[in-house]
């Protein structure tokens, strides 16, 4: 039986209850195929690729063309999960017209089914314009990586009343969900209680309506320091290194390729 396609309205309906939303980042075809065979709800083509794929210190250098490219890789593989694409730095901050045009590129050229953008009340008009164009929007509050210089680094955000007010402003839009990143669990729990759209936490405690992590952190593939809130569920980095060492040894010993690997 073909699995039911996950949609933005379906995620919007998952407020509360005993079926938390699950989301992982994904940047290419191979992992897209693997993850789509699981029960993951959302695959986020994140601008975090700037760090975990490209090796930069932050996500600010990621371009629209790069986001479209990685969206194509993922959407080529995925049939069941909802594919959401990040709006990279300066793709939506300059003007509403730019924001709608760039969101449209991620959908039309990249195949994304929704977009995610960072910010609170300041991006309310932008969210409304993009949703009027028929594109579902996931919002993002708290530790917003594109504002890393303004925040003075990747710092936990603790201004409770400001965060609550920002969340309420987002809740007045047609966004279908809200990512809460890098805020104390107590504040995330309050926001989750006080708004109607589902919240998806990353470093925001257990009381959100769902959780998201960066795939390379989950798999032990990121060479840098993973944040405290992340969890390594496997260590594919070590397994990959071991496999490469085994290949090298077999080639040097003359064991590979063998008869079974050689054409007659």
Image (spheres, rainbow, N blue to C red):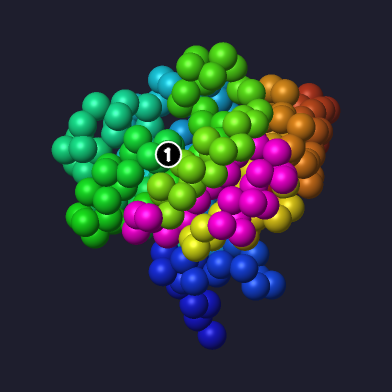
Residue 168 placement (x, y as % from top left): 46, 50
Q: Residue at x 54, y 44 (%)?
A: 164
Q: Is residue 171 above or below residue 45?
A: below
Residue 31 placement (x, y as % from top left): 57, 49
Residue sitting nearer the eye, 230 or 132: 132
Q: Residue at x 64, y 47 (%)?
A: 188
Q: Residue furthest front?
A: 161
Q: Dot 1, how many residues are within 10 Å of its Cα: few (below 14), some (14-19), or many (20+)?
A: many
Looking at the image, residue 62 sits to the left or right of residue 228; the answer is left
Residue 90 seen? yes
Q: Which residues are magenta?
A: 172-194
Looking at the image, residue 68 sits to the left or right of residue 228; the answer is left
Residue sitting nearer the eye, 236 or 155: 155
Residue 236 seen? no
Residue identified by numbered label 1: 120
Answer whether residue 150 is magenta in the image. Answer: no
Q: Quadrant of the N terminus?
A: bottom right
């Amino acid at each position: 039986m073909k699995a039911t396609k996950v949609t933005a309205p379906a995620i919007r309906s998952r407020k509360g209850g005993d079926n938390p939303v699950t989301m992982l980042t994904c940047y290419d075809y191979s992992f897209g195929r693997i993850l789509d065979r699981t029960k993951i709800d959302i695959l986020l083509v994140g601008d975090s690729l700037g760090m975990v794929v490209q090796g930069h210190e932050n996500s600010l250098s990621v371009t629209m063309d790069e986001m479209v490219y990685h969206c194509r890789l993922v959407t080529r593989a995925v049939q069941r999960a909802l594919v959401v694409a990040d709006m990279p730095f300066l793709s939506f901050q300059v003007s509403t017209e730019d924001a709608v045009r760039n969101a449209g590129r991620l959908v039309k050229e990249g195949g994304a089914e929704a977009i995610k953008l960072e910010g609170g009340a300041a991006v309310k008009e932008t969210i409304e314009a993009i949703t009027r164009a028929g594109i579902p929007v996931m919002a993002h509050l708290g530790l917003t990586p594109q504002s890393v210089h303004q925040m003075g680094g990747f710092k936990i955000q603790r201004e409770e009343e400001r965060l609550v007010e920002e969340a309420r402003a987002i809740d007045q839009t047609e966004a279908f969900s809200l990512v809460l990143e890098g805020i104390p669990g107590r504040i995330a729990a309050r926001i989750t209680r006080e708004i109607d759209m589902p919240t998806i936490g990353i470093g925001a405690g257990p009381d959100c309506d769902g959780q998201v992590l960066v795939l390379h952190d989950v798999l032990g593939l990121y060479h840098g320091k993973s944040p405290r809130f992340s969890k390594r569920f496997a260590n594919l980095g070590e397994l990959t290194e071991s496999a490469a060492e085994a290949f090298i040894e077999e080639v040097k010993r003359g064991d590979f390729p063998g008869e079974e690997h050689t054409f007659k």
